[in-house]
Image (tube, grey):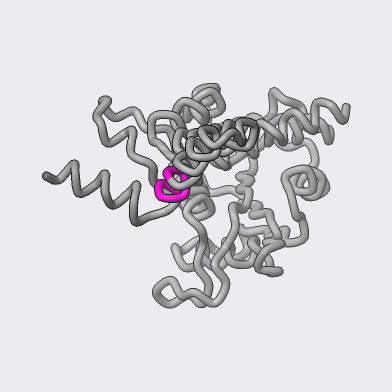
Amino acid sequence: MLLLKKVLTYFLILPPGNISLILTLVGIYLFRKSFKRLGVFLTFLGFTIYLLSTEMVASLIISPLERKFLPPPETVRDRCQVIVTLGGDIKRNVPFLDLKNDLHEDSFKRIVAAYKLYKEKPRPIVVSGYSVIEQFSEAKVMKNFLEYFGVPSKDIIPEGKSRDTYENALRVKDIVGNKTLCLITSAYHMERAIYLFSKVGFNRKRIIPIPVDYKESNSPFSVYKLLPTPYWFYISAKAIKEYVGLVFYHLKD
């Protein structure tokens, strides 16, 4: 009964499941009415949206990006001279307890990791990012969070002008020079981040990747992994964006 309720909810009531179902049914109808090309296209589109919305497929897409990097042990983390945390967007004018602005899921996990590394061994933390969507400094919000957690303001260096990962790398290079850094970002984003940091002049051996915010699901298989949900469509979109970004920068070289 519970499974039936879930199926009806995710296929008939909530997007993207209902959108996928409508496109597929319309596609089949048009195919049978001799609009074969349009019918095939809509059916394919509907089925693709369905697949990208499932936990099973989204995890398969994003896992190759995430499995390349594992969190290093504390002995390795302690080697870096500066902690660099990349922004993952903010929620402006949305409170978090006493703070005026909140962080999106990705940014919050990155900041928690930065705080953890700082507690292990105090050293400067560079927070880098500008939210193009919110037109506001991500770095400022991340700095406020770290201060709220108890990190002294003097140990936080905000870089709030960079609009993408390439600009993150350029501006952080100007700040930290050739110091060994712990680079904190989401696991799915780490490959592109390291590539771009190396591209602007960082020695790859002096970049210690600190991947966080893993999106892949490793739970045992169940029928629920085949239900379409907005969350897993969002995860698929993140993965596709990373692959497109990697291809773009490699072709640009």
Q: Is residue 231 above or below residue 243?
A: below
Q: Main secondary structure of the magenta part?
A: helix
The reply to whether the magenta stretch includes residue 18 is yes
Provide residue 125's location: percent of width, then percent of height: 61, 51
Provide residue 218's location: percent of width, then percent of height: 34, 28
Provide residue 226's location: percent of width, then percent of height: 33, 33
Lateral position of residue 17 relative to residue 189, left or right: left
Please indicate, yes or no, whether residue 78 appears anywhere in the rendered image: no
User: What is the span of residues highlighted in magenta in the rendered image?
Assistant: 16-21
What residue is drawn where x is 69% and y is 56%?
129
Q: Nearer the viewer, residue 146 or 107?
A: 107
Lateral position of residue 108 relative to residue 132, left or right: left
What residue is drawn where x is 26% and y is 44%?
7
What residue is drawn where x is 68% and y is 66%?
137
Q: Is residue 252 above or below residue 231?
A: above
Quarter of the image with the N terminus is top left
Provide residue 251's location: percent of width, then percent of height: 84, 26
What residue is drawn where x is 27% and y is 36%?
224
Hey, which residue is sitting farthest front in the picture?
Answer: 33
Q: Nearer the viewer, residue 231 or 19?
A: 19
Lateral position of residue 17 relative to residue 236, left or right: left
Quarter of the image with the C terminus is top right
The reply to whether the magenta stretch includes residue 28 is no
Please indicate, yes or no, whether residue 243 appears anywhere in the rendered image: yes
Q: Nearer the viewer, residue 115 or 241?
A: 241
Q: Nearer the viewer, residue 80 or 251?
A: 251
Dividing the picture into quadrants, the one containing residue 135 is bottom right
Lateral position of residue 210 relative to residue 124, left or right: left
Labels in figure, total: 0
